[in-house]
Amino acid sequence: MRTSIFLFCAVVFSLTPINIVSQNSKIVVEEDKTLTVEQVFELIMDQTDYKFFFEKGIFKTFPKVQIKKGIIKTNKLLKRSLSQGNLDIEIEEDNSIIIKEKALNKEKALNIIKEIQQFQVSGTIIDASGIPLAGASILEKGTTNGTQSDFDGKFSLTTTNENAILVISYIGYATKEITVDKETNISVVLEEDTTGLDEIVVVAFGSLKKSNLTTAVATISAEEIQQRPLRSLGDGLQGLVAGLNVNVPSGAPEAGVNLNIRGFTGINQQGSPLVLVDGVERNINDINPNDVENISVLKDAASTAIYGSRAPYGIVLITTKGGKKNQKFQINYSSNTRIVTNPNQPTPNDSWDHMEFTNNAFRNNNRPDFYPQLNIDRARAFGAGDFSNPIFDGLDPEHVPFGTFALNPTQWAAWKNGFANTNWFDEGLKKAVFSQQHDLNVSGGSETTSFYMGLGYNETNGIFKGIDDYKDRYSVLGRYTADVTDWMQVKLSTNYVRTEEEGPNVLGQGRNYRTIWNVIARSYPWFPTHNPNGSVYRFNTTANTLGPGGSEGVKRNDITLSGEMVLKPLKGWKITGQYTWRANTNDFTRITLPVFQVLPNGQEVRTQRSAPRSSLIKRTQNTAYSTVNLFSSYERTIAEKHNFYVLAGYQQEENNLSQLQVNSSNFLSPAIPTVGTSRDIDNATDRLIRLGHSWLLWTLLLQL
């Protein structure tokens, strides 16, 4: 037994088939497979020009190789397949690969035997009550050699030496290290891991120790969020909480995330959780990730019941940072940059290939060619930059570099006559965009006070050329806490957020990205971008994204002021009063401009990709929100294991919204697109909405 294990260890270190074949050679695996070494060779030979020669039976003892569906480098696949052998590998000029067994040096083998003395150890893993722990992990320290305990908690492991250290771990139990010390049978008792049970978790209107939680609550720390460059806080939640689905609808700068807890919530609907920031309902996309202290996700009905019908689909509770008592004055600055590309951008056919494919389709349908051969030949010459080719004889030499010509006084050549070669994705989209984020915060505290001030700037740019396609977010967070007495604490906070965003207006539909992609993808490659006189070609789609078609933008200002007083008249009894006032202004502007082309005779007409007229939508919305929270909680632990917790409170909200919108059209001058310079006022609305709510709430938690 020891001899066979020795051979195994020896051959592992004798083979390093890292660069057997070209680094660029790759194999496509259509489905998950488990293959023998010979079958791996067959797979490689089917997709490459490599040939394998080896003695029959040489791989008889080699284990099978498990490979996943996808693309894998040939070198990597060979390394995995041959790593268990002591082999000589040679590759000939004709890509023939010859594999032979390598003779093991006797002296080297004896040295390895002396160095590697295998030792068999077995044992049982149990808890403090003597109950076997099935599935416990047993790992030899410093190696990847390990096993798991069976249903009865038993295990058996061959270690590299008789004094090896075993690392034993099990979920919910403290990890333990045991030295074998020549023992062939050991018994290990694992103790429950209480680390983290005293961690305080924010739940609804209060907080509890994790050990006292009886509902489905997940927590996220600041470190988990801030270790990655983020466009928004919502982006940072992806993959951090089981059951929390984070959907990013598009890559547009202004696109926020859609949150959903545990998926399906009803027929034809997918409800979103209630998002509360320091107890106030807010937009998660407004929060600076660097200002977050922790996040609690309340998943089930028990944890969200206190909010009633406001939170049927769960709650996301966000707590922002504050200073710490007895902390020296600190200044922190962080910055990150992001480069965004469009890796899945299609590569369209060249115009002459497109024409030939179309003609083939017509022929297969027993129909005559759609494109004349003259047009195809002109397109090839245009693509080669051969503008002096005799095939262009009879055309205006100044028109040829544009891929079109004057068909008649009122029409530029198109369809069967155009010969440009335009990649519309390259015309309208950038290859890569640069975005950045900067954060500066100061904090500190004394024995009775603490403070925190955070400043943030986040710039996110979009991929459209020509027009400002971006979203900028500016944020300020200030928090101050003071212990007035031993039983009274006062907290003050302010948060200001300003966002500015702008994007292309497509055919008067605003930032309709579906329309943009649809029209770009369906534009023919032989459409030129511009006419020979410099005006926009009539089927030029990117005129809407490059600026002439107008723009859509939103500017928002949001300020939140909060005050809180906490009283602790008796041990375990806490009374909290909170007042929050929030004001929000939202200015929306959509400018629509017609796009014109100039015909060969000098007449100016709208293009086929133009809005019918100039127009303006101007909307201003103001929101004033205030809320009062008054709640009291009492918590007590009896005999160090019986926990009692009760919470009762009152909440009141008032929300006032005023909105003014004006729709106007037909500007006197496209350079001044305002309501005052519009010939027509199409519509004007003025709305005032006032909402008020109040709730009585209570909860009781007993843990015996």
Image (cartoon, rainbow, N blue to C red):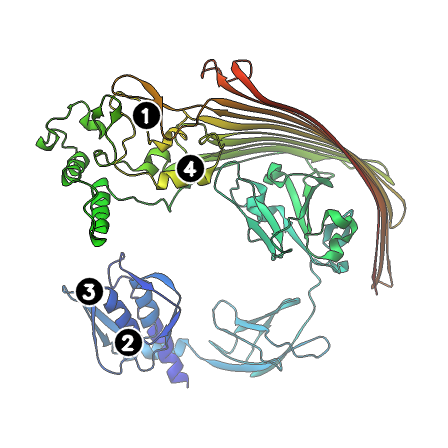
* Helix, strand or loop for disc 1: loop
Pick the front one: 279 or 445? 279
Q: Say few, some or many: other residues with alpha carbon within 10 Å of mark 1 (under 14 / 14 to 19 / 20 or more).
A: many
* Kind of residue sitting beneath label 3: Asp
| Residue drawn at point x = 37 percent, y = 36 percent | 429
Precedes in sequence: disc 3 or disc 1: 3
Q: Which mark is residue 49?
A: 3
- In contact (CB < 8 Å): disc 3 and disc 4: no
Expressed as whole percent of the image width and height from the top left, the position of residue 406 reads 21, 24
* Helix, strand or loop for disc 2: helix
Q: Quadrant of residue 686?
A: top right
For the residues labelled 1 and 4, the Cα–Cα distance comes to 17 Å
Precedes in sequence: disc 1 or disc 4: 4
Pick the front one: 410 or 609? 410
Which residue position holds label 1?
536
- In contact (CB < 8 Å): disc 3 and disc 1: no
For the residues labelled 3 and 1, the Cα–Cα distance comes to 51 Å
* Kind of residue sitting beneath label 2: Glu
